[in-house]
Image: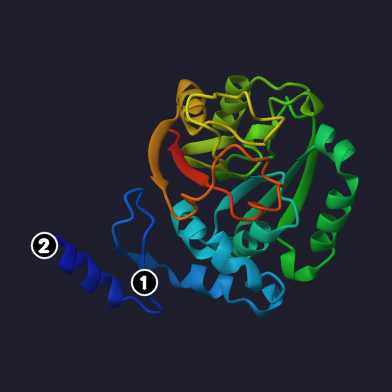
């Protein structure tokens, strides 16, 4: 108890420090979570006004804290969609950092409109530290080693036919190579039925968390934690994620893996 008290007291003495009650543990026990001031400022950025309505549902603050992103870091975000996470990563890493948004060529062919929408971010000087990469899905690379590789709701896409059936372990090894020693790989995705492996990646757009953990660890990563903040016990895991009954509220796992130093 004494060590916990010391940690909390130290956190509260930091400028801009915030401690909030949260339930990020899988067993849903309440805990105090320290929110760094740079995360709080990034989430509160007025330019994100249109995103703010989704923040409670998508747990943006929890995701950023879990990802351990810091000012000055380099982030590689895979298939960034509308740029919801991109905008916050950009604000956190700041002018001394950089965000690389990677769009696999195969995905671009499948959803060119989404990519066109994302490109508006690149034309905004507010996001001068964001650049876009386009490359074959099976040939992941970055201009420089990064501190974090982040993927939300698209790890399951890579082994599918439209992406060229990328071998997940080969993909994970490329992620490993892209990271600095000690770098983090954050994986968020929709939960598939236990024991289903990759059977539902192209049908339900879900993946079994256990197979993800096995694949990533086999590439040399060390499992470094998980969060239950995106868990939804009311999701039956058998509906397509776009089904109106569950869309936007699927049960999702959030894993953190570390590349050894």
* Left/right of residue 97 with respect to residue 135 in the rendered view: left
Nearer to me, 232 or 143: 232
Q: Is 177 placed left or right of 127 in the picture?
A: left
The kind of secondary structure element at disc 1 is: strand
**Residue at the image point whose x is 81% and y is 68% from the top:** 124
Q: Which corner quadrant holds the C terminus?
A: top left
Q: Which mark is residue 20?
A: 1
Q: Which label was assigned to residue 128?
A: none
Q: Is residue 49 above or below residue 99?
A: below
Residue at the spot x=70%, y=47% of the render? 243
Q: State the CA–CA distance, disc 1 to disc 2.
A: 18 Å
Report the front residue among 244 and 103.
244
**Disc 2 target residue:** 1
**Position above or below: 18 against 73:** below
Q: Position of residue 7 (x, y in %)?
A: 22, 65
Q: Secondary structure at mark 2?
A: loop
Q: Please identify the quadrant where the N terminus is shown.
A: bottom left
Residue drawn at 67 percent across, 35 percent down: 204
Residue occupying the far left of the picture = 2
Res 243 seen here: yes
Residue 94 position within the rendered picture, expressed as x and y whole percent measured from the top left? 60, 65
Is residue 188 depicted above or below 85 in this figure?
A: above
The answer to whether the residue labelled 1 contacts the one labelled 2, judged by CB atoms less than 8 Å apart, is no
Tag 2: Cα neighbours inside 10 Å, few (<14), some, or many (≥20)?
A: few
The picture quadrant where one finds residue 182 is top left
On the picture, is 228 further left or further right than 61?
A: left
Residue 149 location (% of width, % of height): 58, 42
């Amino acid at each position: 108890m004494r060590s916990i008290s010391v940690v909390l007291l130290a956190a509260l003495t930091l400028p801009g420090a915030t401690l909030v009650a949260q339930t990020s543990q899988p067993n849903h026990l309440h805990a105090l979570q320290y929110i760094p001031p740079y995360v709080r400022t990034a989430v509160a950025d007025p330019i994100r006004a249109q995103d703010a309505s989704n923040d409670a549902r998508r747990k943006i603050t929890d995701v950023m804290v879990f990802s351990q992103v810091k000012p000055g870091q380099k982030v590689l975000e895979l298939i960034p969609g509308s740029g919801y996470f991109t905008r916050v990563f950009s604000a956190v890493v700041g002018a001394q950092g950089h965000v690389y948004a990677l769009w696999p060529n195969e995905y671009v062919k499948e959803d060119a409109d989404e990519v066109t929408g994302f490109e508006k971010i690149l034309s905004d000087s507010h996001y001068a530290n964001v650049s876009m990469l386009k490359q074959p899905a099976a040939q992941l690379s970055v201009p420089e080693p990064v501190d974090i590789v982040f993927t939300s709701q698209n790890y399951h896409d890579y082994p599918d036919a439209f992406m060229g059936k990328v071998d997940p372990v080969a993909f994970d090894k490329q992620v490993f190579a892209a990271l600095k020693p000690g770098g983090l790989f954050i994986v968020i995705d929709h939960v598939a039925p236990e024991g289903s492996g990759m059977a539902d990646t192209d049908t339900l757009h879900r993946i079994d968390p256990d197979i993800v953990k096995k694949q990533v660890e086999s590439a040399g990563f060390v499992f470094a934690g998980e969060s239950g903040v995106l868990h939804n016990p009311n999701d039956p895991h058998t509906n397509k994620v776009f089904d109106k009954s569950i869309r936007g509220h699927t049960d999702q796992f959030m894993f953190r893996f570390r590349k050894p130093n």
